[in-house]
Structure formats: structure tokens, C-alpha cells
Amino acid sequence: MKYVYLFIVLNFVSFSFASNSLHNGTVKGIVYDEKSNAPIYNARVIIISLNKMTYTDELGFFQFDDIEAGDYTIEVSYLGYENNTSMVAIIDHQTSPIRIDLKQKNLALAEVTISANALENKSLLSAIDLQLRPINTSQDVLKMVPGLFIAQHAGGGKAEQIFLRGFDIDHGTDIALFVDGIPVNMVSHAHGQGYADLHFLIPETIDKVSFSKGPFDPKIGNFATAGQVEFKTKSRLDKNLVSLELGKFNSQRVTSLFKLLNSKDQHIYAALDFNHSDGYFKSPQDYRRFNGLLKYNAKVSENHYVTGSISGFTSRWDASGQIPERAVQSGIIDRFGSIDDTEGGLTSRYNASIQLNSNLSNNDFFKNQFYYSKYRFELYSNFAFFLEDSLNGDQIKQKENRDLFGYKSEYSRTYSFGSLTWNATIGVQWRLDATNNSELSHTKDRIETLNQLAYGDIEESNYGLYTDQSFHFGTQWSGNIGLRYDHFNFIYRNKLTAEYDKLLVNKHIVSPKLNLNYKLNSMISFNGHAGYGFHSNDTRVNVSQTNRDILPKAIGFDFGFNIKPIKNLLLTATLWQLDLDQEFVYVGDAAIVEPSGKTTRHGVEVSLRYQIARALYFDTDINYTKARAIGEAKGQDYIPLAAKWSSIGGITLENKKGFNGSLRYRYLGDRSANEDHSIIAKGYVVFDALLNYTKDKWEIGISVQNLLNTDWKEAQFETESRLQNETESVTEIHFTPGTPLFLKSHLTIYF
């Protein structure tokens, strides 16, 4: 109840203060991209003589209140654009309008400035990287987040395994992913909790990538423990394109982006993508994926924008899956072979979304979004081979059909008093997942169902309410206090029982957040964060184990700084800790519940961006993590697959015309595959290269994955298994080999 009172007080005080703030004169402006006429979000706006600062909203609007009459200089800046300085005349008891157009330019790290704004700082690295490292493949999408590693272990069609901050996140349990506000993670998924398949996102359509680590954002609830990532697709296209890509292993990709309507206030474009590859395994994967996106943006009035989109993908593949080390060492198969080459699957997802953004009177911002997803998943795997069934093998099928409905609404008001700028935000969210015929079955050769282990319908709803009270004091201080409330309803209908069997339970959780940022001078800023977060457990755990922790809490602390010791060098560093309550996990591969005790993780993250010359850049991210189970004996407390050391980086040549390219590395250190450190998942260093030649109307390029043709293991697990000729089971590393040298070329036509 105390949190309810706090929620009411925070919003009552802030909105009341906003309504009654003093008013001399007001300036209300809007910031646009000069070329596209699109509004610019989160541009920094400063009235220099008054030491007042604010940021544009999602429609590009900003406002300063209670300004004495006179003439003032306003400075607007945004990464990748020239700074703009404009004059505005303030008149008592009147609102002075101003429009500011920013002109794009090439990135220069010397002009990147340190800020006290948390949103600007956390998006700074991704904004720099997106300009320097264009996303070329679906796997590149998540690599934009510093410290995040991915591994594919099912033929390219399955969602990537994710590693971040000492978490083996599997396919999304402790990271929340969004595309244009639509959640990617799937609750109570047939394969695993939080399963997040980003393959419906076409890389060429990405406009912005924003991320934050830790449970510190009140707008994000479920799964945002280790962090959250939001991808925003382009509102409009600068030009049409058609691209053809050919590579080894019978790989082809065809991509096209077309403007269908391109007026001043309306824009429609379509994107289509087709992928095929047989992969580098002995048994061809025959991986096929079709993607599509249709997006509409319109300025329906001066203060109202509407965005609608329809997107989707469908894919199918045959997979070699994970193989045991002993099978390779004994010569039964080579490292690209398979034990059961009938593994594989098919999946599809179709999304529809409509969003209305409105800038109201008094600098109020109101955002509403409805979304819907239709999802299908069918996966065949064989992890243990002949451990349980020596005759037919241990192949399993995981299958589901899902309808996902959601609504988001957010209302905020920004006001200023002296050097203080305050933003009061309140939001509501609703999500319903209705999954039919969620199934785990024992199968043979993908054709014959031998036994159903789990089969039923799942209905899970999540209601979220949050407030975010953020402030800027002058140009040096900023911060926010956030409070979030989530309520869940879990329903499971078991279809394996003869009688009607419906189980249900509900639960709620409150998550407070605190963030503070201080800019010491133009060279350095500090930031501190503290907050609670959570991830939900699978519905099948919650309804059958009501005495267990349905919504295990996470508590996190971060302290970091951003520094520019010289004009061409940006360095960020963070010390962090994240503790997670005990939980009980539904294992989708076996239809069983396993306990997972309390854990603690802490570490250091360092990111460096350096401009060597006008068009030459160097970047690196270095991460150290110590992850341990709480309450276990020393030496028995390792968290399986928690990476201790990891790093990515490279050198980039960035020219808008002519030659451009990069040489990059990925390093993942050795890590324990089990609790007592007796089995080690070996690390790797892999180099990739890219070289393009770009002109106004076309681009030709070549890319090489694993430039040195290193033998490496992409995904690794401690697994107990038995081969068909073995009398006893063996527990050891099972792995999916990483790609050998993989050469691709592409030709892109712009028009």
C-alpha cells in the first residue's frame, strides 16, 4: 500500500506544480531534419544565457516557460547534425513559436559533447556505432549492444542464444527486446521463457538502436533485468534500393526497399527480403526466410502524427543441432557433421501496429499504441540422442500457435521554473498472450509422434502502470525517480487429462527506480543508478507451484562515467552489480521444473570510441563479470556459461563515397559449463572483414566472416547423452561449430 501512496503523491505533486508554475513568457519550438522534414527526437536545446536545457519530444517539440521578456539565443544539437543557433524574442504572457531545421553531416567525434542527460548518454554509443557500423545481417542487429554476445545453434532459424552481464540469457529471459514498441519476447514459450526471435526485422530498415543495462527504466517491466534494447525502423526512405547478395554454402539474399508515397506530410514505404542458405554443415540446412514490412507515417495536423505498420516473416530450416565432442574426437562425424540430421523447424510471425503521437497544449505529450502479433512455432531437436529411448531416439517437438494483443498509453508534461526543467510522465500498458496447443512431444524423424509430454492452452495477461519523474537542473544535473506496478494473470488448460483441467493464479509486483547524472565539465560526466526489476516465470510453473516465487526480483546498482580526455576520444566505464532472487524454471525441452537459486553478478564495462583520422575510427568494448550462486559451497557456486571476459572491437573506414569498410574482432573467454568448473566451454577470437565501394547510384562490396578460418565453437552446453552404440551415458560439452571462412559479395542499386 505504501507504494500506491507514493505513486499518487509523485504524480499529484508534479502535475499540480506543472499546472501552477509561474508564467512570464514562453517559447515553444519544433526541430526538424532539414532534408526529410521528419521531427527529431531527443535533440538537446539550450538557452545559453539562462543556463536552461531541455530535450525534444518524439514529435520534435520543446518548450521553455517562465522566461522574462527579451531576446535570447537558442542552441540546438544532435549527433550527426550541424549545431544550430537561433534568436527568439520573448514577450510577457505570450508564447513565441520557433522552427529549427538541422542539417545532416558526417560524424566527427571531436564535436560529440558530454551531457548530463541519461537518455542522450545511453544512446550516444549506439548512435555512433550505427553510423560507423551499418547492420548488414539479422545477427548484426543485437551485436550493436556493447557487451552483448549471441550464438546460433539451430540452423539459423531459431532465435539466437544471448549472453549479457554474466547471464546466459538463453533466448531472452533476462533482456527485454522491442521493435517500434512491439515486444519481441514471448512469455511461456514452448521452447523457453522470454524467447525473443528478431528475424522478422529487416536490417536495412533500422533507423535507431537504443539500449540500457540493468533494471532502471520504469517504462520497461518484464524481462528487463540485465537490460533492454529498442529498435526503431525508419519513418521514411531517402532513396529506393535493390540489393543482391551471393555467398559460399549456396547462400543468396535479395532485398528491396521502395517508396510508395513520398509527400511532405505523408510517407509510405515497403521492404521485402528473401534469404536462403544451405549452411556449412554436411547435411544442408536449406534455410529459407521471407520478410516484409509496410510502414505509413503521416502528419495529420501540426501537433498530431500517426504511424501504422504491418510486418512479418516466415522461415523453415533443417538443422544439425549440437554435437558431442566425443563423436568428433572418435571420428564418428567431423565437426560439421550431425547425429540426427532430421532436426529443424519452421516459424512465422506477423505484426500490425498503429500509433498516435500528440503534442497538446501546455507542452503535454500523449502517445497511444495498439499492436497485434500472430505467431507460429514448430521446432524439432535431439539433445540426448538415445539417452531415454535406445530404439527410437530422443527427438522432441516443441510447437505452439499464439495471438498477442497489446496497448500502451503514455501522458507527459514538461515545465520549467528557473534553471529547473521537470518532466512528469504516467503510463499504462496491457498485454495478452493467448497460446493454443502448446506442445512438447517425443517424436521420430519429424514425422511420427511417439508420446505427448505436455499439451495445453496458455493465457497470460500483464497490466502495467508506471510513473517517471525526470528533471534537468541547468546543464549539469539530471535524474529521475520511477515507480512501476505490474499485475499478472496466469491460466493453463491441461489437455492431457481426461477431465477439464484449468489452473489459474495471479500475482503483482512493484519496482522502484532511481537514476542520477552529473556533468562535472565539458570533459566528464558521472551517472548512478539503482532499481528493482523482475522476470516472470512460465505459466506452467506458476499455476502448479503456487508456493514458489512467480515473479523473482532483481536488484541492480550501476555507477559509471563518460569522459573525453582528448577531443577525438570518447571513453565510458561502468561498475555494476545485479542480484536475482531464487526462482523455479520450466524447462521446455523436458517439461520439468528445475530450481534455480539466488545469484549475484558484478563487473566492469569499458567502451572506447576513437577517431584516428577524418574517415578512420577505432572502437572497442571490454567486459569483465564475476557471476556466482549464493548459498553454495565455494567451488560449487559457478553459474554455467556465465562469461568472465568478453570483448568486441575493430577499425572502420567511413566514406560516404568511395572505399569504406571495417576489420573487426569478437573475443569470448573460457567459461565454466557447470557449477563446479569441471567442464569448460572454450573461448574464441574470430575476425570479420568488410570492404565496399560506394557511389551515388550503386554500391558493390565483399564481406568475410571468420577471416582467419578459425575453428571455434559458437554454442556450447554441458549435456548428458548416449550415442546409439554406447551402453552408458556421457556428460560432456555438446557444441554447434562456428562458421568457417564465409565469403559473401553484394551489389546494391539506389534510385
Image (spheres, rainbow, N blue to C red):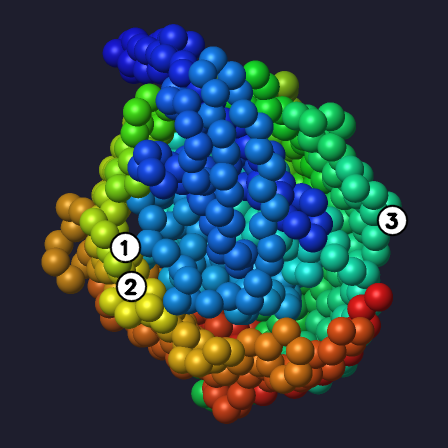
Residue at point 73% right, 81% down? 700
- Whether residue 570 is visible here, answered yes or no, is yes
Calculate the distance from the C-alpha at mark 2 to the C-alpha at mark 3.
44 Å
In this rendering, the label closer to the viewer, 1 or 3: 1
Name above or below for residue 510 compared with residue 698: above
Name above or below for residue 443 compared with residue 585: below
Name above or below for residue 143 compared with residue 547: below
> Residue 386's spot in the image, x, y percent?
54, 66
In which quadrant will I find the C terminus? bottom right
Residue at point 57% right, 63% down? 105
Q: Amino acid at mark 1?
A: Ser
Disc 2 is placed on an element classified as: loop
Q: Which residue is mark 2?
A: 564
Q: Earlier in the sequence, mark 2 or mark 3?
A: 3
Disc 1 packing (10 Å; few <14; some 14–19; many ≥20): some
Residue at point 15% right, 62% down? 635
Q: Amino acid at mark 3?
A: Leu
Q: Are marks 2 and 1 in contact (CB under 8 Å)?
A: yes
Calculate the distance from the C-alpha at mark 1 to the C-alpha at mark 3.
45 Å
Q: Which residue is mark 1?
A: 522
Most foreground residue, 233 or 250:
233
Q: Which residue is mark 3?
A: 260
Q: Amino acid at mark 2?
A: Lys
Disc 2 packing (10 Å; few <14; some 14–19; many ≥20): many
Give residue 370's quadrant in the image.
top right
